[in-house]
């Protein structure tokens, strides 16, 4: 259970990391989501170069040398894109296990697109992904104008779809990009209370 003072947003809480940087934290049950930092670069490079992870993202593994990657990484941290929010995923013990990203710079200001990757394979299939999604969805819906969170996942990525369904997302369409078929899944603000109680529905039923 959270130990946050009543009336204070979880995301207001600011802490100092080991390097003394001020970082924003969002606490879940098993994970802490926090701002990206240069110390993440080594893990992020390894994950970007991993052919299995690239395949799950319908991408090519990175081939650039680490020095080139790091230069660009530091620039991105120094001059972050306003619309994209990139967060590191740590265990409660402080181990960096993945990243998540969301943006609301699309055509509809009431919608947010979400992405997640548990990079460390030892931490997959253990409920960390579901905790991240539930935690970040709670954070995103703190913005009262946000009605919908959506994401894309490859049609054969059964694990990801199962994880998202556990968090209340339902399939609402398909899109083909670069020869890959992606399922679009969505979570609507008004579903959240019901979803926590367990009912499963198809997206079409709700859209009446
Ligand atoms: C997709 C991802 C975020 C999910 O996070 P996670 O922590 O592994 O997921 P969870 O443990 O919360 O849930 C996964 C569920 O799928 C189940 N599962 C795993 N592999 C499965 C398979 N081949 N078939 C069916 N179910 C499967 C797990 O048992 C679990 O269900 P359960 O809780 O009912 O037992 C994470 O695995 C990941 O980042 N994978 C690599 C990158 C990736 O796939 N990225 C694409 C994201 S769109």
Image (cartoon, rainbow, N blue to C red):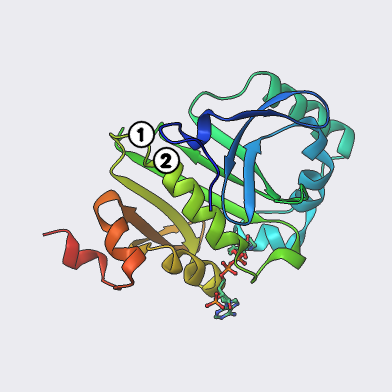
Which residue is at a point 82% across and 50% down the rendered structure image?
46
Q: Confirm or deny contact between disc 1 and disc 2 (CB under 8 A).
A: yes
Which residue is at a point 80% across and 23% down the rendered structure image?
20
Which label is found at residue 140? 2
Residue 6: give x, y in percent of width and height: 43, 36
Asked if one can make out residue 155 in the rendered structure from this viewpoint, the answer is no
Image quadrant containing the C terminus: bottom left
Which residue is at a point 35% across and 56% down the rendered structure image?
186
The quarter holding residue 127 reads bottom right
Which label is found at residue 143? 1
- Image check: 18 left or right of 156? right
Foreground of the two, 92 or 177? 92
Residue 57: give x, y in percent of width and height: 60, 57
Foreground of the two, 47 or 99? 99
Q: Residues within 10 Å of mark 1 (few under 14, many from 20)?
A: few
Mark 1 to mark 2 CA distance (whole Å): 6 Å
Residue 99: give x, y in percent of width and height: 65, 47
Whether residue 30 is situated above or below residue 36 in the rendered picture: below
């Amino acid at each position: 259970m959270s130990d946050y003072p009543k009336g204070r947003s979880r995301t207001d809480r600011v802490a100092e990391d080991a390097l003394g940087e001020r970082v924003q934290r969002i606490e879940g049950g098993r994970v802490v989501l926090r701002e990206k930092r240069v110390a993440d670069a080594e893990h992020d490079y390894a994950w970007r170069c991993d052919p299995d992870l690239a395949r799950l993202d319908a991408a090519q593994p990175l081939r650039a040398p680490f020095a080139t990657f790091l230069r660009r990484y530091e620039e991105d941290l120094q001059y972050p894109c306003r619309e994209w929010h990139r967060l590191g995923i740590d265990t409660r013990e402080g181990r960096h296990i993945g990243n998540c990203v969301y943006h609301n710079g699309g055509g509809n200001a009431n919608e947010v697109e979400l992405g997640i990757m548990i990079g460390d394979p030892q931490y997959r299939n253990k409920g960390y992904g579901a905790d991240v999604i539930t935690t970040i969805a709670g954070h995103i819906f703190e913005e009262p104008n946000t009605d919908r969170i959506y994401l894309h996942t490859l049609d054969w990525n059964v694990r990801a779809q199962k994880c998202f369904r556990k968090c209340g997302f339902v399939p609402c369409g398909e899109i083909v990009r670069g020869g890959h078929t992606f399922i679009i899944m969505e979570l609507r603000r008004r579903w959240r209370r019901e979803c926590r109680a367990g009912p499963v529905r198809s997206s079409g039923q709700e859209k009446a």
